[in-house]
Image (cartoon, grey):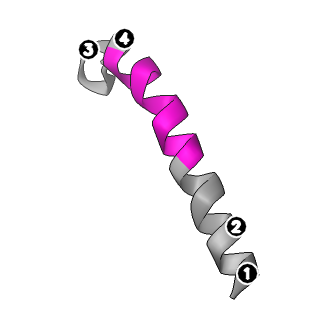
């Protein structure tokens, strides 16, 4: 269970870190 909890935490950190980048470069403006 600890492995899944650590994986979930790392996933949430990755999403939180990618949010500002997506806000600066929205996917629908790159096309």
Quarter of the image that includes the N terminus: bottom right
Residue 13: % across, % down: 57, 44
Q: Residues within 10 Å of mark 3 (few under 14, many from 20)?
A: few
What separation in Å lies between label 4 and label 1 (alpha carbons)?
A: 34 Å
Q: Nearer the viewer, residue 17 or 29?
A: 17
Considering the numbered disc 4 on the image, is that residue within a helix, a strand or a loop?
A: helix
Q: Nearer the viewer, residue 28 or 6?
A: 6
Considering the numbered disc 1 on the image, is that residue within a helix, a strand or a loop?
A: helix
Q: Which residue in the structure is indicated by mark 2?
A: 6
What separation in Å lies between label 3 and label 2 (alpha carbons)?
A: 34 Å
Q: Nearer the observer, disc 4 or disc 3?
A: 4
Q: Nearer the observer, disc 4 or disc 1?
A: 1
Look at the image and give the residue range highlighted in magenta.
13-23
Residue 27 falls left or right of residue 10 = left
Q: Which residue in the structure is indicated by mark 4?
A: 24
Q: Which residue in the structure is indicated by mark 3?
A: 29
Comes first in the chain, label 4 or label 2: 2
Q: Nearer the observer, disc 3 or disc 2?
A: 2
Placement of 7 over or under 24, stated as above or below: below
Residue pushed farthest right?
3
What separation in Å lies between label 2 and label 1 (alpha carbons)?
A: 6 Å
Q: Are marks 2 and 1 in contact (CB under 8 Å)?
A: yes
Q: What residue sits 41% from the left and 30% below the top?
A: 19
Residue 11 falls left or right of residue 15 = right
Q: Is residue 20 magenta?
A: yes
């Amino acid at each position: 269970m600890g492995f899944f909890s650590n994986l979930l935490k790392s996933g949430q950190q990755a999403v939180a870190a990618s949010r500002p980048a997506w806000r600066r470069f929205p996917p629908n403006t790159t096309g």
